[in-house]
Image (cartoon, rainbow, N blue to C red):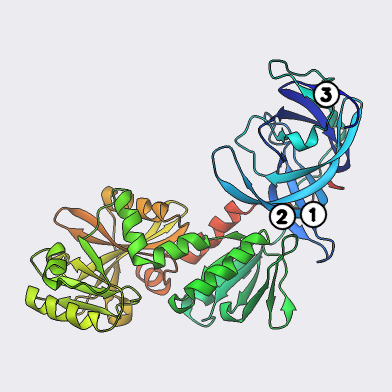
Amino acid sequence: MSDALELGWEEWLALPALGLPAIKAKVDTGAKTSALHAEVIESFGDTGSPKVRFLIRPDPDHPKLELVCTAPVVDRRDVTSSNGQTELRYVIATEMQIGSVRRTIEITLTNRETMSYRMLLGRSAFGDHTTVIPDRSFIQPKLSFALYQSIKPLKPKTRPLRMALLTREPDNYSSMRLAETGRERGHIVDVINTSRCYMKIEARAPEIHYDGKTLPFYDAVIPRIGASMTNYGMAVLRQFEAMGAWCLNPPSSIGASRDKLLAHQLLSQAGIAMPVTAFAHSPKDTKDLVGLAGTGPVVLKLLESTQGRGVVLAESKKAAESLVDAFRGLDANFLVQEFVKEAAGADVRCLVIGGRVVAAMKRQAQEGEFRSNLHRGGEAMAISLTPDERKIAVAAAKRLGLNFAGVDILQSKNGPVVLEVNSSPGLEGIEKATGKNVTGKVIRFIEQKVRTLGKRREINA
């Protein structure tokens, strides 16, 4: 803005190239970059000239007023908000008009749905000859949302979602059911082997390549990442997020659930009941370590254990001490956990989707076996949960940030306790035991979370 300009702490402005004739903005001298409300952000276009498409509802009081805008991407950068949270945002350049002054400014795109102002005007948009008077508002001419009356958005038209199912086991029950159910509901589901993905790390147009081809934009990603692929799988998932895809479980939450030490610490901090647990790598005082988990039988687990492998029951304290000495020789991290005898070789698997328990089964170990995993011959039956069991299962999934989780709980004499939280729970046992279409609930949850842009009036920048 080369012309002298006075601004109050709130002003009306227009973004003509985006087709937005009126936006009420908060003028913030403490923010460097301007920000615009955007939902359902989709990247598209050539690698050399990427673009972004997004939905905006410019009037906070009339959410049914929706427009779709597109603009070239000039950058992607981390932006730290006033509450200290850092977010990777698309940056676009577009023309802004306040009063008689026009100027091209950079704007970051972020969801400001909970904010009173759909736009924040940062100081980089002010120019050298701008004065901000913080105790005044609307110094420049006022506009009105009535200007949108001439823009009539077309009725939304649903389109199929494009989903990526990340798995190295496309033929197992869970993967096949998720892919089949998604396709039955009219969506495109691509089954992708996690290990065959490789990535182009680039600010404006990040890419994922697969068998020599660039993967397209995906609305949603369903991660079924095995324990052996956790670290690389999380990297691939982060890349999908950078490309604008919504992930059923975020990579950080998958990592937290796989790291048994971190998971137990997070659950403990949230006050969620668990069997008393001690963690170690190579303790010198074996007796003290075992004593931390109690005086009775204890369970020893390798941190990398899955499906009951690497899990041993020590009937006595002496046996436990011998096993700890043996584990020490493996140079591995492990835990010693209180054995909940009254559970009688049974646990309860709760399937949590979107903060609700949608199915539950009781798994009973074979006679003489304390591990109830179905992979080890355990039997499953449907069960009705108590309110406390539902509450603790939902709380555990929420604490780890998982939208979709299998929460295993034990029925102890002091109430339910969380044994483990699984970010890629198997679906065969629980669907057969309960007769519920769990995969259908997963796909419907994704549909609810991922809004499609459909066919509305689209303004090209």
Q: CA distance from mark 2 to mark 1?
A: 8 Å
Q: CA distance from mark 3 to mark 1?
A: 28 Å
Disc assigned to residue 143: 3
Q: In the image, is residue 345 above or below residue 37?
A: below
- Residue 312 figure quarter: bottom left
Residue 396 pos. (x, y %): 36, 54
Q: CA distance from mark 3 to mark 2?
A: 31 Å
The amino acid marked with disc number 2 is Arg
Q: Is residue 118 left or right of residue 260?
A: right
The amino acid marked with disc number 3 is Leu
- The mark lying in front, picked from 3 and 1, is 1
| Dot 2 and dot 1 residues touching (CB under 8 Å) | yes
Q: Secondary structure at mark 2?
A: strand
The amino acid marked with disc number 1 is Val
Q: Which of the pair 410/284 is nearer the observer?
A: 284
- The mark lying in front, picked from 3 and 2, is 2
Residue shown at 69% from the left, 53% from the top: 77
Q: Secondary structure at mark 3?
A: loop
The quadrant of the rendering that contains the N terminus is top right
Q: Is residue 180 visible?
A: no
| Dot 3 and dot 2 residues touching (CB under 8 Å) | no
Instruction: Tell me which numbered mark, 3 or 1, is placed earlier along the sequence.
Output: 1
| Dot 3 and dot 1 residues touching (CB under 8 Å) | no
Residue 391 pos. (x, y %): 32, 49
Disc assigned to residue 76: 2
Q: Is residue 174 visible?
A: yes
Residue shown at 46% from the left, 76% from the top: 226
Instruction: Tell me which numbered mark, 3 or 2, is placed earlier along the sequence.
Output: 2
Residue 348 pos. (x, y %): 28, 64
Q: In the image, is residue 348 above or below residue 156?
A: below
Task: Give the labeled residue for mark 1.
Answer: 73
